[in-house]
Amino acid sequence: MGRTVRTFSPRCCVLLLTLSIFPRSCITLVDSHDRIIAVLGGVPHGSKGMEWQAVEAAATAAALRCRESSAFTAAQKHGRRGDFASRTVGFGYGNGRRKPQNYRVSGKANRKAMQELLQNQAIRRISGFQNALFNTFCHKNYMEHVDTNNELLRKQPELRANFPETAFAATTFNLGPLSFSPPHMDPDNRASSWCADTSMGPFNPDKGGHLVLWDIGLVIRFPPGSTILFPSALITHSTIPIQTHETRYAMVQYSSGGLFRWRENGFQSDKTFLARATPEERVMRELARASRWKLSLQKFTRWTDICHGDWRGAARTEAGLDELSDLSDLEEPLHVLHPNKRVCRQ
């Protein structure tokens, strides 16, 4: 199924992980409690070299056509994630939106270009592979995404999914020509879940385009056509610049955390929920908030379960082990923790 690398303190050293263009297996990053926190997925298992190269080349050509037939504002070409053109489609909630809404694409030509990109078969194959990795290595999170999307789409038929079968609500296309980013996090994304990132070329992955995960001290070789999933809202990450004569694009799928809060509130905002809530509901909400970190950790797949063929974690759930926390040193109430105590125990 794959290889596993356990995380470590970034103060010790920096580990360079080499992700080949055609690896025979995935590489999983596992924390000290056996939870899979990220997956270096490479390319689909069983795909032949030339076959997936053709998919990546077709997706790159589609991204180039989209860029050339689109117009971008200054903000869309120079954002906090880097100086490259980008466009987001799908739906999200937060940043002033009163309810979940579609991301707006202004201009007839821009909408046509983006629709053609979303319908491209190579782009759809990449989306399918991203979802397959998500489902295989983080099944409980994947199902929460699917259920949330399905309920939102039933409640609000005007919302548009980017692909027929995807667990992610939004897609950002980094359309270059030099798509690399300074260190940053993506705080609007679901904190207890993953984003899926696929790079496209052409560029020399030995000289640039590496993904850097700063908080865990990893530098990852990231060739065109490869896919990586990781918690972008929790880990500071960046991309090493490519050479000036090269081109790099990226396709990133994710879901905003606000969508899950909207659903948990009974499809309403925090403000509306609290205004209508009874005292008992407010107490229950506070109890749920205090334990949310624990419940979120339980949704990450254990490497041991994968090794035993139980990638869904069904045996653990049936045995009631999901309700047990292995973080005993953080079990005491948050209000009695000293400010530096949690840092020392991470």
Image (spheres, rainbow, N blue to C red):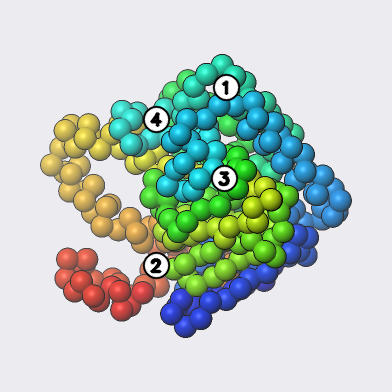
SS class of the residue under badge 2? loop
Q: Residue at x 73, y 50 (%)?
A: 202
Which image quarter: residue 60?
A: top right
CA–CA distance between discs 3 and 2? 33 Å
Indicate left or right for 166 with 73 as reference.
Answer: right
Q: Residue at x 54, y 70 (%)?
A: 218
- Amino acid type for the residue under numbered disc 2: Leu
Q: Earlier in the sequence, mark 4 or mark 2?
A: 4
User: Which residue carries the number 3 mark?
Assistant: 252
User: Which residue carries the number 4 mark?
Assistant: 100
- Amino acid type for the residue under numbered disc 3: Val
Residue in front for this viewpoint, 319 or 164: 164
**Comparing labels 1 and 3, the label whose residue is closer to the camera:** 1
User: Which residue carries the number 2 mark?
Assistant: 324
Q: Residues within 10 Å of mark 1 (few under 14, many from 20)?
A: some
**Comparing labels 4 and 2, the label whose residue is closer to the camera:** 4
Q: Residues within 10 Å of mark 3 (few under 14, many from 20)?
A: many
Q: Earlier in the sequence, mark 1 or mark 3?
A: 1
SS class of the residue under badge 1? helix
**Comparing labels 4 and 3, the label whose residue is closer to the camera:** 3
Q: Residues within 10 Å of mark 4 (few under 14, many from 20)?
A: many
Relative to 136, residue 59 above or below:
above
